[in-house]
Amino acid sequence: MVCDLDNFLFTFITPILPEILETRLQQPASRIQTLTSLILAMNALVSIILAPVTGYLADKLSSRNGLLIAAWVANMLGTAVTAWATTLTVLIIGRLIQTVAGSVIWIVGMAMLANAAGTRHLSKAFGVAVLLVSAGLLTGPAVSAALYKFVSYPVMWSSAFIVLLIGLILQLLVLEPRGGGAHVSSHPKDWDTGDEEHDTTRTRSRETQTQTLDATDPLLPSSPAAEARTYHTTTDATQPPSPAASSITQEENIYWLILRKKRVAAGLLGDTLLAIVIASFEATIPLHIREVFHWDSFHAGLLFLLLQAPTLVLVVPVGGLKDRFGLRYPVSLGFVLLAPSLVLLGLPGQEFWGMMMGGHSGRVVYLGALVAIGVWRTLILGYGGVEVLNGANELADEKPGIFGSNGGYSRTFSLSNATWKGGMFIGPLVSGALTEAVGYFYMNLFLGMTIIFRAWTRIPCAPRPTRTSAAWSGIIVLAGGTGGFGRYLAEAITSSPDYAVAILTRSKAPIWTSHPKITTHQTDYTAASLLPILNTTRATTLLSLIRCSNDIYLPLHTHLLDACIASQTCKRLIPSEWAGNVDDFPLLPRSYGLTRAPFREILRARAASHHIEWTLVNHGWYMDYFLAEHKSYIAYVPGEFPIDPQTWTYRVEGDGEAPHITVRVPGVTLRVCTVCRKELRGLHEVAGRPFKREYRSVEQIEHDVEQHPTPSDDPNIALPELEECTIKGAICCPREKALRQKEEIFAGMEFVGLEELLVRAEREGFN
C-alpha cells in the first residue's frame, strides 16, 4: 500500500511537467522536451546510485519500519520544495529529495513484501504489489492533470500532501514483529562428535522428537501459518561475528554472485528494456499528443490512466499463471506482442502510404495501441524482481549465512531497482533525443526493434517451477537428519501432499535425500548459519535429531532456539530428547541429566515469551528393533534393546517387572503409536517361537553404572545407563497420560500390542 502511494507521488508531476516548465518556470518552448527528459532521467540516475546503499543499510538495520517512516517525512519535504519551486534549480532540488525518499520506500517496502511472501508466492505477491503500484501510477497523473486543469495549482499539490499524510499514518501503524531481541550467538564450536549424521550406526531411537508436554496440538497442522512473521536479531556486542558468515561476505561480492546467475541477468535485462519503454512514454506522450491531436495535460493524464488500466485488472491472475507455469512463456509472449504495438503507437501523425494518419482514425489507433501495450506489459512486469529474489534464495541455499542474520532481500531487490531505474534513466534521454532527431514514429520503431531482438533471445528462466522445499505448505527442518531415524521421518513427512523436508548437515548428504520434496543444507549449527536457511526455506518446524550426551548438546540446541526466535516462520522447536518419562525421571539417563534437563529449563524460560511452541516425545523403544537388521533403517547395536531379533534372545533386567513402551518408527512420524506393558519374561511363549533368555541383575547394573558411566566426550549413552532407566521404570510413559494423549492426539489411529505385533511378524514373515 505504501509503495502504491509513493508511486502516486512519483508520477504525479509527469503530465503537467511540460506546462510547469513553460508557464511557471518561464522556460523557452524549444527546451521543454530536453528539460522534461533530463528531469525524469535525473531522478532515475539518483535512484541507481542510491539503490545499493539503501539495500545495504536496510539489511543491516534491525527495524526497517523506522527507516520507512523517515523516508515518508523526507518525501513530504521534497514535495513541498517541488510544489513551491519558482526556479529550475529549486524544482530539481525538490525532485532529488523526492527521489531519495522514494527509493528507500520502494526498495525496503518490496524487500519486506518478499520476506512475507516466500518463494512459492513471489509472482502473485509481486502481482498484488504491481496492482497497487499501478493504481498509484494510474491515479497520480490523472488526479494532477484534472486538478490542474479544472481547479488550481495549489489545490493540485494539496491533494499530494493528503496522500503523503495518509502514507505516513499507515507506516506508523505498521507493526513489525521482532525476534524478541534474540541474541544470535556467533561462537562456532567444533562439534565433531555430536553430529549423528557422521555415523549412521550411532543413529538410534533416542535422537528424538515432538509435542509439548501435555500439548494437544498436532505436529503437522492442517494448514500452515498464514502470516509470516517479520524478524530481527541483535548480536551481542561482546561476541565477534561468525566466521562462517563473515568470511563469506568478506571474500565474495553478493551482488556479483547473484548477477552471475543467467536467469537473474536475463530478468534484469528484460526489466531494463520495459523501463526504457515506459519512461519513453512519460517523456514523449504529453508533447506528442499536444502536437498531433492538440490535447492538453488533462488528456495526457487520461492517456496514462488508459495505459495503466489493463495492468490494474490483469496483474493478479497473470501473476498466478506465472507461479504455476513459470516466467519464460508469459514474458516471451509479452515482448513479442509489445513490439508491433509500439510501432502502431508511432503511426498517428506520421505520413503513411502518402496519407497523414491523423484525425479520428489516428486517435483510434493511438488509443488502441496504448491499451494493447498496457495488456502486454502486464505479462512482463515483475520479471526482474522475481528472478533476482529467486536468485537470492538459490544463493542462500548454496552458501548458508552469506546474507547474515537479517537476510539479504533489501540488497537483492536493490539490484532490480537499480536496473529498472537504469531503464528509466536511459528511456527519457534516448526517446527524447530520437524524437527530436528522427521523429516520434522512428523512435517507437527503434524501441520495437530492440524489443523484438530481446524476444528472440532465449530467456533462461525455469519454464515451469517445480515445487521445491521452499514451495510447500509446510517445511519440516531436520537438524542432523541424515541418519536412520531422519530417513524414517523424511519418508513419512514427504508422503503428505502438503509437507516437505529440509535436512541440515555438516557433511555431504546421503543418496536417499535426492527426493523432489527434500533439500539439504550445510551448516555449522550457529544461529547465524541456521537463520538464513530457516528463512529461505520458509520452515515451520525445526526438529533436532542430533544425538549427543556431552557438553555439545546445550550450546547447539540453544543456537537452534535462537534461530527459531529470530526466524520469520519457524516457530516450532522439537529438541533431541531422551525417549523416556521425563516428567517423573527428568535426570535419567544420568548423562542426559546434565544436557537435556538444563535445556528444558531454557525452553520454559524463553520459549513462551518469544512465541515458540516446543514439545518432547516419549516413544520408549522403537518396535523397529524387532526387525532384522536389513529391514530397518535403525542401526543394530548389540545389547542396546532388550529384544535382539538377530539372535532371538531377550534380556531380563532386574526383576523383569519394569513396564515398557514400544512404538513403530513410522508411527512416531506419521500415525501409529503403540503402547504396551507386556512383561519381557513372558516372551518365550509368544508366537510359538522360543527366545533365548538372558538376565542382568539390579546389582550388576548398578555396579556398571557407577564403574562405567558415559564419558563426558562420548556422544552415545553407555548401555548400563539404559539398563538403569529400564529397571527404574523411566522408559515408560505413565499409563494414564499415554491413554489420555491417545484420545486427544491419536484418535482414530490403530494401536497394536506387543504380543499382537509378534504374531503378525511371525505370520507375515519376520526374517
Image (cartoon, grey):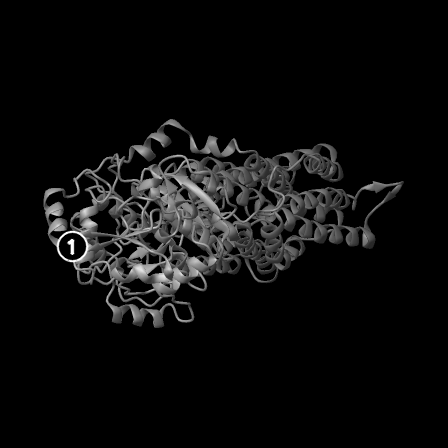
Q: Residue 152 in the image: state x and y as whole percent.
A: 55, 59
Q: From the viewer's perspective, is 94 left or right of 692?
A: right
Q: From the viewer's perspective, is 546 left or right of 435?
A: left
Q: Residue 59 in the image: state x and y as whole percent.
A: 37, 42
> Quadrant location of residue 407?
top left
Q: Secondary structure at mark 1?
A: loop
Identify which residue is drawn at 30% across, 60% down.
683
Q: From the viewer's perspective, is 632 left or right of 642?
A: right
Q: Does residue 709 show up?
A: yes
**Residue 278 sits above or below residue 655 on the image:** above
Q: Residue 406 in the image: state x and y as whole percent.
A: 35, 44
| Residue located farthest toward the right when viewing the structure as drawn | 354
Question: Along the line of sight, which residue is nearer the eye, 676 or 551?
Answer: 676
Q: Does residue 88 show up?
A: no
Q: From the viewer's perspective, is 620 left or right of 440?
A: left
Question: Along the line of sight, which residue is nearer the eye, 418 or 468?
Answer: 468
- Residue type highlighted by circle 1: Leu
| Residue located farthest toward the top when viewing the structure as drawn | 251
Q: Residue 319 in the image: state x and y as whole percent.
A: 59, 53
Question: Along the line of sight, which residue is nearer the eye, 148 or 481?
Answer: 481
> Quadrant location of residue 757?
bottom left
**Residue 432 sits above or below residue 467 on the image:** above
Q: Which residue is mark 1?
A: 587
Disc 1 residue crowd, few under 14, some 14–19, many 20+, Cα 10 Å: some
Identify which residue is drawn at 64% across, 34% down.
430
Identify which residue is drawn at 61% across, 35% down.
429
What is the tally of numbered marks visible in this picture?
1
Question: Along the line of sight, which residue is nearer the eye, 723 or 266?
Answer: 723
